[in-house]
Amino acid sequence: MKHFHKTRPELREWILATTRAGHGPMDVLRLMKEAGYDAQQSRRAVSEVLEIPLAALNATAPRAGSKLPRHPVAPQMSVDEHTVRITTSVDTPTVRVLEGLLTGTECDDLIAQARPRLQRSLTVDVDGRHQTDERRTSNGMFFRIGESALIQRIEQRIAALVDIPVSHGEGLQILHYQPGQEYEPHFDWFDPTQPGFTAVTARGGQRVASIVMYLNTPDEGGGTAFPAVGLTVTALRGSAVYFAYDTGDQSSLHAGLPVAKGEKWIATKWLRERPYQR
Ligand SMILES: O=C(O)CCC(=O)C(=O)O
Ligand SMILES: [Fe+2]
């Protein structure tokens, strides 16, 4: 472990050079961690050199009561009456392709229950406000936690699969994409250097993992792409993609590719580090 009080000139120079090379502050912190620096001292140095509020960087540190998901383990896992097959695993970013997470009937029932409640999807802006966004042209809706027997069953299955309590989940979101619609590359974690961070993480803290479940099989296109690794997960009815990330994990960039033919329905579950439900 290396120690410093006032940021040493070499370290200051390295932080500036790394930033000029295009790395964000989270990346700088990760590189320092890999080099053996103490986390709190790294945040202090990055805060001082890059003039980012220390409170914002401290918010990236896991706090008491935070829980990380257990990544599903190949070849398969049994949860309630289901066998979920883990057909592909990627280390960086952490990705698991899950086959058979939902039954065909569950997919159809989710679509039927969501359809009359669809609205234009929103994104969360830098001030923590929800708004429509050209990068995200789908229609969607949220189910409340435990709002029906079906929703409860799916929430409990996911909780068992990744060992995170149901209370850490945001309400299940349904999205419907029509031909040409897509979700452009983005991160699901909230950026601590953005002003809205405190507001969006006040309840439940940071997001730690996402599960995108495919409720139908689009005729063409509509997979979930991870451009950092050149991976595209096929949207197949009943399958899902699980991915987990640290704050600032650049490799977790992902996109819902444009639907070329047919339509696409997904259910997304975002998991927080702490209870989101009161
Ligand atoms: O549509 C997809 O395949 C990805 C959806 C997604 O990234 C999200 O809901 O956060
Ligand atoms: Fe996403």
Image (tube, grey):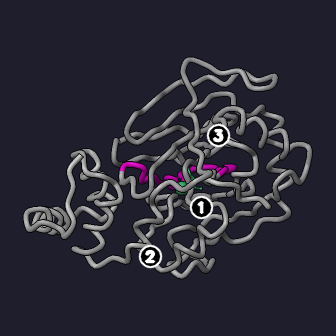
* Distance of label 3 from label 2 (alpha carbons): 36 Å
Which callout, 1 or 3, points to the residue nearer the camera?
1
- The picture places residue 59, in percent across and down from the top left corner, at 48, 65
Q: Nearer the viewer, residue 257 or 219?
A: 257
Task: Please state the extent of the stretch shown in magenta in the rendering.
Answer: 251-269
Q: Label 1 sits on what residue type? A: Gly
Residue 205: numbered disc: 1
Q: Tell which residue pokes out farthest to the right in this image.
A: 149
- The picture places residue 170, in percent across and down from the top left corner, at 70, 57
Q: Say which element carries label 3.
A: loop
Q: Tell which residue pokes out farthest to the top in this image.
A: 75
Which callout, 1 or 2, points to the residue nearer the camera?
1
Q: Is residue 237 left or right of residue 234?
A: right
Q: Say which element carries label 1.
A: loop
Q: Crowding near pointer 2: few (<14 within 10 Å), some, many (20+)?
A: few
* Distance of label 1 from label 2 (alpha carbons): 15 Å
Determine which residue is flagged by label 2: 194
Residue at coordinates 55% horizontally, 24% vertically from top-left? 73
Q: Label 2 sits on what residue type? A: Gln
On screen, residue 71 above or below 124: above
Determine which residue is flagged by label 3: 217
